[in-house]
Amino acid sequence: MLKPRLPLMPKMLLFILAGFLLLITLIPLRLALTFSQVPEPQAMLVLGGSFGRMKFTAHLAHSHPNLPIWVSDYSSNFAENSQIFLDSGIAPERIYYDFCATDTVTNFTCNVPDFLAKNIRHLYLITSDYHLRRARAIASIILGSRGIVFTPIAVNSHGKSPESNLKVLRDQIRSLLWVFTGKTGASFKPLG
């Protein structure tokens, strides 16, 4: 008796769906395990786009003098960002500047290799309150897929409205694209 065979497309769809389900199951487990192993942050990651975030991070750095600071921002902001930290008395050797990022997804994908190379598995994630939901969604996928946990810290944006659900969903899809292909799809969307 012949067994019915599924055509190629449904097989591929089932394979992709199984991979996706495995991933969304493994990431929370991996994060829980990492958090139990590394309950305290080992570094700070501040997302660029606001000098208020830099000032907040400089202030926070005084209460965590042994934590290195990653600044993911545009190179055009380097002079002002570095001056904020210098004026706050933060040693320049504590700060790692990343100018690779072009948007929030690449804020994370550009820095993951550095975090892994330095065995950093728990971060303070610093961004504005209006931006935190999207940053957390992206970080959960990108950092979580690599076993890096984060403790989010929201900087007051003085009433700026939270980002749209569509933006969050778009960047979750882009984050999954990166996990599976190593590509962020940054060239297919406007900066943001």
Image (cartoon, rainbow, N blue to C red):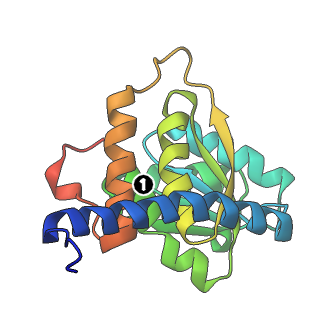
Q: Is residue 60 left or right of residue 70?
A: right
User: Of the residues shown, which amino acid type is indicated by label 1?
Assistant: Asp
Residue 136 in the image, given as x and y percentages of width and height: 55, 44
Residue 100 in the image, given as x and y percentages of width and height: 35, 66
Q: Residue furthest bottom?
A: 117
Q: Against 30, is 138 above or below?
A: above
Q: Is residue 6 left or right of residue 17?
A: left
Residue positioned 60% across, 65% down in the render:
26
Residue positioned 51% across, 27% down in the render:
130
Q: Is residue 74 visible?
A: no
Task: Out of 130 and 148, give the one closest to the viewer.
Answer: 148
Residue positioned 76% across, 47% down in the render:
60
Residue 121 in the image, given as x and y percentages of width and height: 69, 71
Q: Quadrant of the N terminus?
A: bottom left
- The residue singled out by tag 1 in the image is 73
Question: Mark 1 falls on what kind of element?
Answer: loop
